[in-house]
Image (spheres, rainbow, N blue to C red):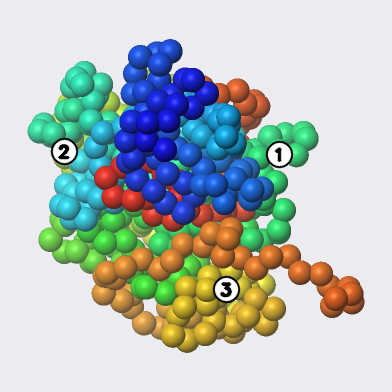
Amino acid sequence: MVGRTLEGRYTILAKLGAGSMGTVYRAKQHAMGREVAIKILRGDRAVDESAKARFMREARANSLLASPNTVTVFDFGQSESGEFYLAMELLEGESLGQRIARVGRMPAPLAVDAARQALRSLGEAHAKGIIHRDLKPDNLFFARVLTSAVRPAADGGDAHDEIVKVLDFGIAKMIDAGEPNPMNVVETQAGTVFGTPRYMSPEQAQGKPLDARSDLYSLAVILYQMLAGRPPFTDNDAVVVMARHIKSTPKRPNEACPEALVPKELEDVVMRTLSKDPNERPASAEIFAGELLAALEAQGALTSGVRASITNAAGIPIPDSMRPPAVPLPKPKRRVPILLIAAPLLVVGAAVGVYLGMAGRAKTAPSATVPIASTVEASATAATARPSAEPATTDPPTITPDSLPKAQPPASAASGKHTKGGKGKPAPQAKPPPGSPQATTPTPPGYGILGD
């Protein structure tokens, strides 16, 4: 592929990385005289309708977004030889996942600064009816920039020349009023669960309809990990992790990592955003950003630069009215016993069980045609009966469309910022919109925009 020219417009210069969905290359865009990243869908994926739909979804979602904290997609097309490709801005830097692996936990001001930058991207996306649904450290990227004028630093140092970018809208839910969204064609299987178990919201793990507050939960999981050096739930088994998100209350960050010394007000905000009930979380990305700022202000942990830099997606400073006073976290309410949610857990167990079976686990997972709700219920019961395990060295496998069983006939039968796209509309806050999550696989080290 290196040396080839796509449609006479992009010359491939070097390979940057590869994943299950495709390969990313450094390329030269001749018309603009700049280098870009070209993501090319793998040949065998090009004949997969769900993979193509996901690829198109990423292009369309990004075409609606203009935030500097969202990776920019310049172009989408199909080459003369049939390859589907995306042309994106070329990012230099490292993903949050790579940074956490390299430096561990982060000081509260820096962690909050990274989170509020991601919230700028999410605020715009949510206002345009786009739910990301696969937020995780690999999909937040610390991109190096040429000038420190892009944003004020949190506490000096390297933060001056970095900006956080949200990546991979390939499985985003795009909420359109009126006619069905063709980009959601692969979501016709009701209750199907896709996603990264470590960062799923409870409603996502149960295959329920999602709204913007699901993304806020996922970002709170990431913020928890930045502060404590580990995610709230560290089990290696995907079913157990999802059961914990549904049922278990995580330790507060300072309990998980006493040396972190996270301000209590900030802990309260994080834990409130990790509420099982979406109604108990902040109602929007802007409000979440305001609560984070207020928490650090209460402790005097902010510099004037950070205080001035917390803004909403439109770049307008968040008013004091959107910063509720920090209050002690109330004791969690008792939730519905896990045995009463067997139906949604059946969906989770089936999806994860089939994946784990395909992955060659020593213990064969039950077939997708056999009820396995009891397996998931047992995991959920165990999750509430014992504390979370020590930090895991590996993540449980992600759940991908390819890991799910193909639709089977009933027993009585014989025998995947600047492309053109549709208009997005604001996501309702009071009533969750219909939709279901999906997932990606981790991106290769050194880049972070594969979205696989």
Q: 66 or 328: which is nearer to us?
A: 66
Residue 80 appears in which quarter of the rendering?
A: top right
Q: Earlier in the sequence, mark 3 or mark 2?
A: 2
* Callout 3 amino acid: Val
Left or right of residue 174, residue 141 in this image: left
Q: CA distance from mark 1 to mark 3?
A: 27 Å
Q: Position of residue 24 (x, y in %)?
A: 40, 40
The image quadrant that residue 76 belongs to is top right
Any part of residue 72 in sight: no
- Residue placed furthest toward the left: 157
Residue 300 is tagged as: 2
Residue sitting at x 36%, y 23%: 28
Picture disc at residue 182: 1
Q: Amino acid at mark 1?
A: Pro
Mark 1, secondary structure of its residue: helix
Residue 307 appears at what percent x and percent y? 24, 28
Q: Residue at x 58, y 60 (%)?
A: 402
Q: Residue furthest bottom?
A: 363
Q: Which mark is residue 354?
A: 3
Placement of 293 over or under 266, stated as above or below: above
Which badge, 1 or 3, is on the more N-terminal residue?
1
Query: Of the numbered discs in the image, which one, if any, rests on residue 170?
Result: none
Mark 3 neighbour class, 10 Å CA radius: few under 14, some 14 to 19, many 20 or more: many
Q: Is residue 238 above or below residue 362?
A: above
Along the viewing direction, whichever of 328 and 101 lies nearer the viewer? 101
Question: Residue 57: x percent and y percent?
Answer: 58, 38
The picture quadrant where one finds residue 372 is bottom right
Where's the N terminus, which quadrant?
Answer: top left
- x and y percent of residue 217 in the render? 44, 52
